[in-house]
Amino acid sequence: MMHSSRLTRRSVIKGALGLALATTALTTLGLPMPAKAAGKKVIIGAFADGGLTPFKEKIIPLAKEQGFDIQFLEDEYGVTLEKWFADAQSGAGQYDLYLLDDPWVPQFGAANVLEDLGAGGIDGSDKDWIGPMIDMGYWPPQKGPRVKGFENAKPTLICVPFVGDLQTLTYRNDVFTGGAPKTWDEVIAKGKEGVAAGKIKYPVVFRGVSGNPIVTSWYPVFLSFGGSFFDDKWNPIFNSAEGKASADFFVGTMKQNAPSGVVEFDSDQEGAAILGGDAGAIIQYSGNALKADDPAQTKVAGKLDFGVVPKQEKAIAQMGIFIAGVPKSAPNKANSIEFLKWYVSAETQAKLSEAGSIPVKRSAFGIAKPGNRLIPVALQQLDAGALPRPRTPDWAKVEELLGIELNKALQAGSGGGAALDTAAKQVKDYLTTAGYY
Amino acid sequence: MQNGMQARKYRLQGAGLDLALPYLMLAPGLTVVLGVLVYPLWDGLRASTRAYRYGSPVADVGFHNYVQLWSDAQFLNSLWVTVKFVALSVSIEAVLGFALALFCLREFRGIRLLRTVLIIPMVITPVVVAILFRLIYASDAGMLTALSVAMGGGGVQILGNPLNAFIGLVVLDVWEWTPLMFLILLAGLQSLPHEPFEAARVDGAGSWRVFADLTFPMMRPVLAIAIVLRTIDAFGTFDQVFVLTRGGPGEATRLISIYGYDTAFKFQQTGYAAALFVTIGLVVLALAFSAIRLLRRIDAS
């Protein structure tokens, strides 16, 4: 028997309707699945940084043993702030936990998009926290000036410190044979001797790219010269005499003693210069410092030591910790908070320290065998002085304005003080428009 | 009688269906257009008249955002950089694209392969192109520096110098988008009638005379379309700058798209960024209309 299968308009419409209904049914059935199948699933968003390597390699497997199903999603630093802020604000619920850079906390706090972790059972008053680090998790801040609209608000713990990163000095022990250089003058003078002896090519290296990179590199120099950024009323005072001296030193002396292309250097080129054996000293976060003893990642293994940042007046570093926040839209909120409670416990922090990462609890600094030589130096730096960046939701814009002017002065190799004057005016104008005064 | 009424009812139903059917058929498409084109446009326009704080609207400010743009030094600088970038890139691409199209118009052995090779840059993802150029330009380990050092020179500063970085960006754009010009112009050249050219040759006209009196005048409409398309596209250049320079050094390569992106997403000034993009949209629209008018004038002449 012959069977004819003619394609008619009716059969096409019926087929299309059937397909549409089937797709709708499958989608409807499929949508709630991720939330229901959560168990102890935690989706962590992080920016790619070597400072998180010990966490990824050693702590995530431990978390799995505790029954947590960790999904670790990494992005490039430059896009994470906007990506996560959009996720949190739109309630898209793509993440359970953000590992923020600490200056971003005020922006998320002011937008009220993060969970109250204190209410979730995390104790912000635990004396074991490193004080300045847990302070960064509160919005509005417990200490220091507050922006308008939040003067009388009760500080809420919206983030908890995750990796206690801060700047320290990494130096070549065959160049600075008497130990870590104590002052900037010593860094330059001994570094020049190292260049003359053919041990290194440049006394120092730093990041010169406009925006966050150059401001991050200049900041410890600025602090060491005794500069302050804002007064109690949010007036920019970074263009004080101390600030200008630091900027002139940075764009002048430091540039002259750095690689010629330093204006375009970011952390990858900076890391290559110190780990490749070209530079004598660098102030950096833990990302590249953790590679200092690994012959697979450095040409000068055994020749790199760590110390407290050099001083002109004070030896103060910039703190830039990884800090964890749970978005209100997190699909696995309870799991995230449970994970954080486990992660910040003294036991897990000790494991983190063993793994080689800078912990956020003081007890973890004192363990018998920290996994990296950097950890005790980080504690020394904390005790010597380490400051966070100003706690304002507009820091990204302030950093951008200042970064552009500093970068221009760095290109010119002079005019650091004038650059700060220009930036201070721009910052003041911007904050005036934003209603700060 | 009853049959007559029933027939009339059916006729009316049929007529109603006939009337409604086109609209019913259009409805899904129209819904999609309203949803993905008109609504976002309307929402953007509405956002441009509002002030935002911490990512949320706090007040209606009318045209204040639009007025503020013209006293914003960073916006004006970005606009100027963008205009310079578009003018320089598109001009070079037009000249090079035309020259390549004229060259590839001839038939010789290997011409098909050459035409294929010439359009390769255009099909590579812009981000990949930017990464390639970063590897070429980097002053510490870039190809240009390696070449210079091998020849006894020093490091080559491209991305750390404002002028060089700008030129480097133009070179990247020209490398990537000349093939588009080439393709459009080659298609235009291939569609020209043969008779006028044969007649000119019989009359003894040289290559330059043929080009100046025949090829170029006949190609003007195609050239104008290619330039308009590239100009509109170049105004929106983002990926390459984002990867290559992020707008630096200083503000040397900060195109309007980068400034708008930072304003909207990094600094959370949503309303101001919306006003900025609406303004740029209007500028590009004005350019497109001017070009169309120019085309009509060319046609008329």
Image: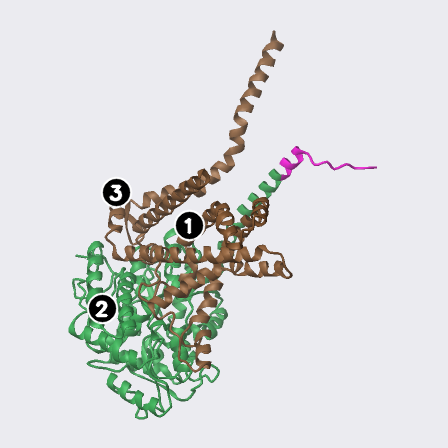
Chain colours: A green, B brown
Chain-order first, disc 1 or disc 3: 3
Q: Which mark is residue A419?
A: 2
| Distance CA(mark 2)–CA(mark 3) | 35 Å
Specify the quadrant that holds the N terminus of chain A.
top right
Tell me the magenta residue range.
A1-15
Subunit of label 3: B
Contact, mark 1 vs mark 2 (Cβ under 8 Å): no
Q: Which residue is mark 1?
A: B232
Q: Is residue A127 visible?
A: no
Asked if labels 1 and 2 share a chain, the reply is no
Estimate the x, y position of residue A255 in percent, counting from the top left: 29, 78
**Could you say which quadrant of the image residue A341 lies in?**
bottom left
Q: Which residue is mark 3?
A: B62
Q: Is residue B200 above or below residue B300?
A: below
**Is residue A4 part of the magenta span, yes or no?**
yes
In space, the residues marked 1 and 3 are separated at their CA atoms by 28 Å
Chain ID for label 1? B
Q: Which numbered disc covers residue A429?
A: none
Whether residue A244 appears in this view of the structure is: yes
Q: How many marks?
A: 3
B89 horizontally vs B70: left or right: right
The amino acid type, in three-letter code, at marker 3 is: Gly
